[in-house]
Image: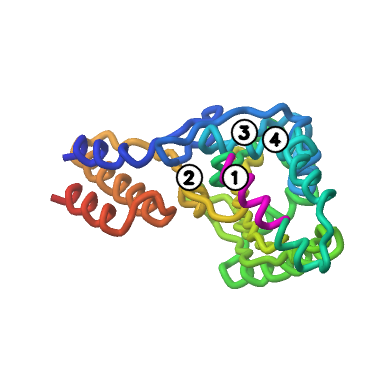
Amino acid sequence: MILGFFLSVNAYSKIINIENKILLNVPENFKYIKLEAEEAADYYEDFFSSLGEDANFYYIGTDDSIKFANALINDQDSLLEPIMKKMDSKNFSTEKSMIKFVSKEIKKLMKKNKYQGVIWVLVSDENLEDTDYDLFEVVESLKNMNKADINKAALEFKKEIKNQLSVDGVEGMNLKISKFNIEINKINSPAFDLQIAANMFNINWDMEIYGYLKNDKPIIIGSECIGKCKGVSGIKNMIVYSKTKATNTSSENSTNIVENLNKLNDLYKSGVLTKEEFEKAKKKLLN
């Protein structure tokens, strides 16, 4: 029964292991690459500046999506050069016509490069207490709060992030926070769950960021979607938390079923499985 379940699910997903620090349940055709720290440092500086220098950064997605996202970081001028040349040859009568042209060209560029969004992961080898003591103290204080107090703290942090975006946001992107929560996750670590939405040249841009501490070291998982994407939303539901194995055979089987049901539910929530596929696989597991 368990084997049949995994055969069913593995047609749609797989689990990747990054440095034995985080497991992610992702679509079967996703791969991952490690970026040089300096390549990602400037691009994601606002998010990672307090995590120290001893950190590794990874992109996860289809080969084409990773190449496109990597080019946006390292070779943006060459990537956008054809569009810029076309713009130079145009004589736009209005700003609206210019925006419409750029929007169309960017969508064509993403389609040509088969871009479907990417997931990114940062894992740090430094304790947060050593790299940002103030932030570490905030995390420690959250551990002793009840849910109501955590929600109040989340509102204050949301205001700070909103103010930061309004000051440092890219002009014309209309950045806004669509979600910000603080929760205690499955390994009893305070975690922040942030979603940012933007629109530039009439193209939607969405980012999810989920961060927490594991053994006092930061782990941050994010996703970026420009336009329409597939398989990169619901990142926190892709995380597979390790659990202690039961010694009793019967208990072990029960634990496996519960774990598999949780994984199946996570796949459905993240969009990897359709509702029909979810119900079929769940029925097969329970029977």
Task: Identify the mark at residue 47; answer none if there is no mark.
Answer: none
Residue 108 colored in magenta in the image: yes
- How far is the residue under mark 3 from the one under mark 4? 6 Å
Q: Residue at x 66, y 33 (%)?
A: 57
Whole-Å distance between the Cαs marked 2 and 1? 9 Å
Q: Confirm whether the magenta stretch covers residue 225.
A: no
Horizontal side, residue 67 vs residue 73: left or right: left
Say what secondary structure mark 3 lies in. Answer: helix
Q: Earlier in the sequence, mark 4 or mark 2?
A: 4
Segment colored magenta: 102-112
Q: Earlier in the sequence, mark 4 or mark 1?
A: 4
Whether residues under marks 3 and 4 lie with C-beta atoms below 8 angstroms apart, the answer is yes
The residue under label 2 is: 239
Spot occupied by residue 96 in the image (x, y as percentages of width and height)? 76, 68
Label the magenta part by its dominant secondary structure: helix
Q: Find residue 176 and report its horizontal and vertical position in percent.
A: 71, 66
Q: Is residue 212 visible?
A: no
- Categorize mark 1 by other alpha carbons within 10 Å: few (<14), some (14-19), many (20+): many
Residue 71, numbered label: 4
> Of 161 and 189, which appears nearest the observer?
161
Asked if residue 168 lies left or right of residue 221, the reply is right
The answer to whether the residues at label 2 and label 1 have Cβ atoms under 8 Å apart is yes
Residue shown at 59%/28% (left/top)?
33
Badge 1 marks a residue whose secondary structure is: strand
Q: Secondary structure at mark 4?
A: helix
Disc 2: CA contacts within 10 A as few (<14), some (14-19) or many (>=20): some
Q: Which residue is mark 3?
A: 67
- Closer to the observer: label 3 or label 2? 3
